[in-house]
Image: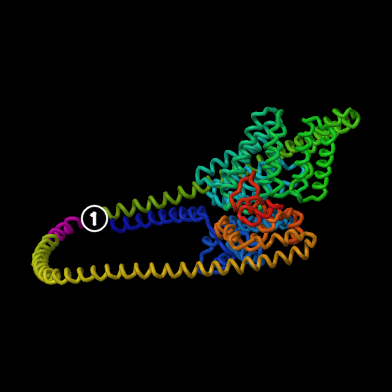
C-alpha cells in the first residue's frame, strides 16, 4: 500500500513538472527568431496534425508580410482566426485581429487597419498575450500619427508597445523594423522626453543582442535629441554633438551598406542636409562641410522631395544672410516657402499639417530678419506676425494634447482600477478553490498513509524472513556465475592473442606496399596537374585575346552608330574612337578588377573622349541625373577619391588618346 501511495504522489509531481516544461518550451519557441514563407504559413494552418497552440505560436510569432498573393495569405490567417473563435481563445482572437491589422498597415489600407483594431479592442479585457498587446498599441500609435492633436497619445502608445515587445522577447530582427518606424516619427516630431525614453529602450535591447541597425538608431535619436536641446538653449556645443552623431550614422551606413535596402539611402540624403543645416546655424559656418554635404545629398538625389529642397534653399538663404547678401537670401527663402507649400499641397507626408509649423516658423523668422536688413520694415513686421501666429498655434496644440492626455489617463485609471478589482476577486476565488482541492488531496493522502502503515506492521516480520532467504540464494548464484564468466574470459583472450600474432606480420607487408603505391600516385597526379594547368593557361590567353578584339570592334561600331545618329556635329569623337585599342581595353578591365559590363565600357570611352553630361545623356537617351550617378559609381569602383578627375584617369589608360589630346 505504501508503494501505491508513492506512485500516486510521483504521478502528481510529474504532471506538474511536465506542465511547467511545456510552458517554458512554448515561451522559448515564441522568443526565437523565425522566418516563414507564404507556402509554409498555408501548410501550417491547413495541417490537421499540428495542434492549435503550435499553429498560433508559429504564425503569430513572425513578422510575415507578402506583397503578392495577398488573398492566399488572408485566407490562411482568417482560417486560424476562425479556429481561435471556435476554441473561445481570447488571446488567439486578439492575435489574429492585430496580425491582420498589421498586414493592412503594411499594405497602406488605414480603413481596414482601424476596422481590425476595433475588433481587437473588444478582446482586450479577456486577453493576456503580451505580443498581441504590443502589436495593438503599436498600430494604435501609428493610426494616431495623422491626428492634429495626437502627438502625446502617439508617444504613450509607442512607449507601451516597446515595453511590451521587450517583455515578450520578440525577435530583434523584427523589432528593429518597428524601431525604425518609431524613430522616423520621433525625428520628425521631436520631443526630448520621448526621444530619451526611446534611447533607453534601444540600449535595453542592445544588451540582449546588438546589431548595426540598432547602433544607427541610437545615433539618429541622439542627434535629434541634441538638435531639440539647441532650440531651447542655443549653444554651439549642442550643434557639434548633433553633427557628430549624424556623421556616425553616415559612416556606419556606408561601411555596412550591404546590410541596408536602397530605400535607406534617401534617409542618408536627409541626414546630409541636416548636417549642412546644423553647420549653417553656427556663428562661423564650416563652408567646406556644408558644400560637401549638400553635394553628396544632390548626388543621391532629392529632385522629387520638395521638403528637402525647401530645407536646402533655407540653408543657402541662411548662409547668404550671414554674408550680408540680402537680395540672394530673400530669393532663396521665398523659394523655400514655395517648395514647402507645394509639399503640403501634395499631401504625401504621413504627418498632419500642424507638424510643419515649427519649420515654417523658422522660414518666417529668417524672412523677417532679411526684410528688416533690407529696410522693408512693414513686410518684416508681417512675416514676424505670421511667425508669432504659428507659435500661438503650436502652444494651443500642445495645450490640447496635454488636455487630451489628462482625459485619457483619467479614463484609463478608472479602467485599470476596475481591472484590478476584477483581477483581485478572480485571484481570491481561484485561491480558495486551490486551497479546497489541496485540503482534499491532503486528507486522502493521510488516510492512505495510515492504512498502509497498519498493514505494513502486520507483514513486516514475514517479509524480513523471506527477504533474508532470498538474498542468501541470490548471493550463491552470483558467485557461481562469476566463476564461470572468468573461465570463459581466459579462453577467449588466449584464442584472440594467437590470431593477433599471425596477422601482425601480414599487415606490416601490406602496409609498406600501400605506402609505396600512394607515393607513386601522388607524383603522377602532380605531373598531370602541372601539364593540364599549362595547357589551360595557353588556351585561356588565346581566348581572352580573341574575345577582347571582338569586344573592342563591337563597342567601337556601336559608339560610331550612336554618335553619328545622336551627335552628328561631333566628328572629332568619331576621329578619336579608333585610338581605343585592345591594350586600352585590357588596362581598363585590370583597373576594374576584370569585372566591368559592356555599357560601362562604353561610358568610360565616352568620358575619355571628353563628352560632357548633356552629350552623354543625349547619346544614350538617359537622364542627366543618371549620368551623374554613373560617374559616381565609376569613380567608386575604380578607387578614385573625390579630388581625382575621372576623365584624366581614363585617358591615361589609353596612351594613344592621351597623345591625341596633347596634340590638340
Relative placement, left or right, of 497 versus 88 is: left
Magenta stretch: residue 274 in it? no
The residue carrying mark 1 is: 456
Q: Secondary structure at mark 1?
A: helix
- In depth, the one of 497 and 142 nearer the eye is 497
Relative placement, left or right, of 320 versus 83 is: right
Quadrant the N terminus occupies: bottom left
Residue 213 in the image: state x and y as whole percent: 57, 47
**Residue 193: quarter of image:** top right
Residue 537 in the image: state x and y as whole percent: 46, 67
- In depth, the one of 289 and 251 nearer the eye is 289
Residue 312 in the image: state x and y as whole percent: 75, 41
Height in image: 89 above or below 426?
below
Magenta stretch: residue 468 in it? yes
Q: Is residue 119 visible?
A: no
Q: Is residue 4 visible?
A: yes
Q: Residue at x 64, y 45 (%)?
A: 642
Give the class, few, some or many, for how many residues have Cα within 10 Å of label 1's Cα (few <14, many ≥20). some
The magenta stretch is: 455-469
Amino acid at each position: 500500500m505504501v508503494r501505491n501511495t508513492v506512485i500516486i504522489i510521483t504521478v502528481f509531481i510529474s504532471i506538474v513538472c511536465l506542465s511547467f516544461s511545456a510552458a517554458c518550451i512554448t515561451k522559448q519557441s515564441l522568443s526565437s527568431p523565425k522566418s516563414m514563407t507564404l507556402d509554409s504559413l498555408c501548410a501550417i494552418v491547413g495541417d490537421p496534425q499540428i495542434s492549435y497552440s503550435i499553429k498560433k505560436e508559429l504564425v503569430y510569432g513572425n513578422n510575415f508580410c507578402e506583397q503578392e498573393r495577398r488573398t492566399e495569405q488572408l485566407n490562411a490567417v482568417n482560417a486560424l482566426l476562425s479556429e481561435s473563435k471556435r476554441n473561445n481563445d481570447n488571446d488567439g482572437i486578439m492575435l489574429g485581429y492585430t496580425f491582420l491589422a498589421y498586414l493592412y498597415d503594411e499594405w497602406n489600407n488605414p480603413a481596414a487597419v482601424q476596422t481590425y483594431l476595433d475588433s481587437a479592442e473588444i478582446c482586450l479585457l479577456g486577453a493576456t498575450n503580451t505580443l498581441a498587446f504590443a502589436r495593438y498599441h503599436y498600430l494604435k500609435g501609428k493610426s494616431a500619427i495623422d491626428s492634429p492633436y495626437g502627438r502625446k497619445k502617439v508617444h504613450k502608445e509607442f512607449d507601451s508597445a516597446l515595453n511590451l515587445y521587450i517583455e515578450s522577447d520578440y525577435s530583434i530582427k523584427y523589432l528593429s523594423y518597428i524601431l525604425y518606424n518609431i524613430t522616423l516619427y520621433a525625428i520628425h516630431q521631436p520631443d526630448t522626453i520621448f526621444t530619451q525614453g526611446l534611447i533607453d529602450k534601444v540600449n535595453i535591447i542592445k544588451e540582449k543582442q546588438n546589431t548595426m541597425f540598432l547602433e544607427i538608431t541610437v545615433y539618429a535619436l541622439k542627434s535629434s535629441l541634441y538638435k531639440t536641446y539647441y532650440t531651447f538653449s542655443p549653444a554651439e556645443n549642442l550643434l557639434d554633438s548633433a553633427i557628430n552623431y549624424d556623421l556616425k550614422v553616415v559612416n556606419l551606413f556606408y561601411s555596412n551598406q550591404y546590410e541596408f535596402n536602397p530605400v535607406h539611402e534617401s534617409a542618408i540624403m536627409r541626414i546630409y542636409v541636416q548636417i549642412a543645416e546644423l553647420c549653417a546655424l553656427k556663428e562661423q559656418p564650416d563652408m567646406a562641410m556644408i558644400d560637401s554635404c549638400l553635394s553628396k545629398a544632390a548626388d543621391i538625389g532629392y529632385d522629387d522631395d520638395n521638403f528637402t529642397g525647401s530645407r536646402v534653399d533655407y540653408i543657402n538663404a541662411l548662409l547668404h544672410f550671414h554674408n550680408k547678401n540680402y537680395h540672394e537670401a530673400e530669393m532663396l527663402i521665398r523659394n523655400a516657402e514655395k517648395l514647402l507649400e507645394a509639399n503640403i499641397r501634395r499631401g504625401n507626408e504621413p504627418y498632419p499639417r500642424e507638424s510643419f509649423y515649427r519649420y515654417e516658423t523658422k522660414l518666417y523668422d529668417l524672412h523677417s530678419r532679411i526684410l528688416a536688413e533690407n529696410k522693408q520694415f512693414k513686410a518684416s513686421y508681417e512675416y514676424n506676425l505670421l511667425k508669432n501666429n504659428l507659435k500661438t498655434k503650436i502652444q494651443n496644440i500642445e495645450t490640447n494634447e496635454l488636455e487630451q492626455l489628462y482625459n485619457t489617463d483619467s479614463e484609463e485609471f478608472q479602467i485599470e482600477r476596475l481591472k484590478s478589482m476584477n483581477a483581485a476577486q478572480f485571484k481570491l476565488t481561484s485561491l480558495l478553490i486551490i486551497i479546497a482541492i489541496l485540503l482534499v488531496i491532503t486528507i486522502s493522502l493521510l488516510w492512505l498513509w495510515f492504512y498502509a502503515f497498519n498493514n505494513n506492521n502486520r507483514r513486516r516480520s514475514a517479509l524480513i524472513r523471506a527477504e533474508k532467504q532470498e538474498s542468501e540464494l541470490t548471493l550463491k548464484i552470483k558467485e557461481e556465475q562469476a566463476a564461470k564468466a572468468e573461465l570463459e574470459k581466459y579462453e577467449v583472450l588466449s584464442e584472440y592473442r594467437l590470431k593477433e600474432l599471425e596477422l601482425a606480420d601480414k599487415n606490416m607487408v601490406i602496409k609498406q606496399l600501400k605506402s609505396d603505391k600512394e607515393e607513386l600516385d601522388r607524383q603522377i597526379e602532380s605531373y598531370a596537374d602541372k601539364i593540364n594547368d599549362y595547357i589551360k593557361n595557353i588556351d585561356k590567353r588565346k581566348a581572352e585575346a580573341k574575345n577582347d578584339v571582338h569586344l573592342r570592334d563591337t563597342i567601337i561600331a556601336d559608339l560610331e552608330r550612336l554618335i553619328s545618329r545622336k551627335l552628328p556635329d561631333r566628328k572629332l569623337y568619331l576621329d578619336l574612337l579608333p585610338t581605343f585599342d585592345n591594350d586600352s581595353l585590357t588596362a581598363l578591365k585590370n583597373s576594374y578588377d576584370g569585372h566591368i559590363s559592356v555599357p560601362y565600357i562604353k561610358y568610360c570611352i565616352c568620358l575619355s573622349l571628353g563628352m560632357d553630361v548633356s552629350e552623354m545623356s543625349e547619346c544614350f537617351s538617359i537622364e542627366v541625373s543618371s549620368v551623374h550617378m554613373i560617374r559616381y559609381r565609376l569613380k567608386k569602383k575604380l578607387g578614385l577619391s573625390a579630388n581625382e578627375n575621372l576623365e584624366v584617369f581614363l585617358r591615361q589608360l589609353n596612351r594613344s588618346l592621351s597623345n591625341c589630346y596633347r596634340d590638340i
